[in-house]
Amino acid sequence: MNSLADVCRELTWGQLVAWSNKSAVLEGRKLQQKGAVKKLMRASKGEGLLAWVEVEEPFAVLVEMEYGEFFAKCSCNPIIYPCEHAVAVIIQYIVYLKRNSPVPEAKPNDPRLYLV
């Protein structure tokens, strides 16, 4: 089974659009590019990502991978599809991977986990 890092290294825009939708991917990219993703950390034994995405208000975002599939939870509470905040977190993680930047491990009692 591929790790979160392996999947993200090979992830294409088309796959990201298929997981979410075109609008969320475009908005997520804008959020990531303007630096809205804060305090990115690994969660769920390294197979998840936890971050704040600061827009008008900060949103807690958890993106996990299970059986090769992404699952997202966000305090913005999207109804049907993964939101632009979750997409921004994935894109930010891809940037970290390309730069070989370390992503610290979140503590089990991280307050963001209680918000998603």
Image: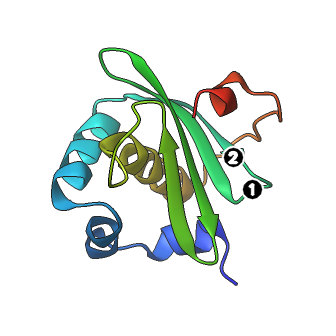
In this picture, residue 76 sits left or right of residue 4: left
Whether label 1 touches label 2, CB < 8 Å: yes
Disc 1, SS: loop
In this picture, residue 5 sits left or right of residue 44: left
In this picture, residue 106 sits left or right of residue 72: right
In this picture, residue 59 sits left or right of residue 116: left
Give above or below for 96 relative to 111. Answer: below
Give the crowd class for mark 1: few <14, some 14-19, many >=20 residues within 10 Å: some
Label 1 sits on residue: 46
Q: Which residue is drawn at the image coordinates 30% and 15% (left, top)?
A: 56
Disc 2, SS: strand
Label 2 sits on residue: 42
State the residue in front, 41 or 60: 60
How far is the residue under mark 1 from the one under mark 2?
5 Å
Q: Which residue is drawn at the image coordinates 29% and 44% (left, top)?
A: 28
Residue 46: quadrant of the picture: bottom right
Question: Residue 16: x percent and y percent?
Answer: 33, 66
Give the crowd class for mark 2: few <14, some 14-19, many >=20 residues within 10 Å: many
Question: Residue 73: x percent and y percent?
Answer: 51, 45
Question: Residue 110: x percent and y percent?
Answer: 74, 27
Question: Residue 13: x percent and y percent?
Answer: 28, 69
Q: Can you say which quadrant of the picture contains the N terminus?
A: bottom right
Say what amino acid the circle numbered 1 marks: Gly
Give above or below for 96 relative to 8. Answer: above
> Residue 69, which numbered label?
none
Residue 2: quadrant of the picture: bottom right
State the residue in front, 108 or 29: 108
Q: Which residue is drawn at the image coordinates 29% and 72% (left, top)?
A: 18
How was the colour assigned to the protein in this rendering?
rainbow
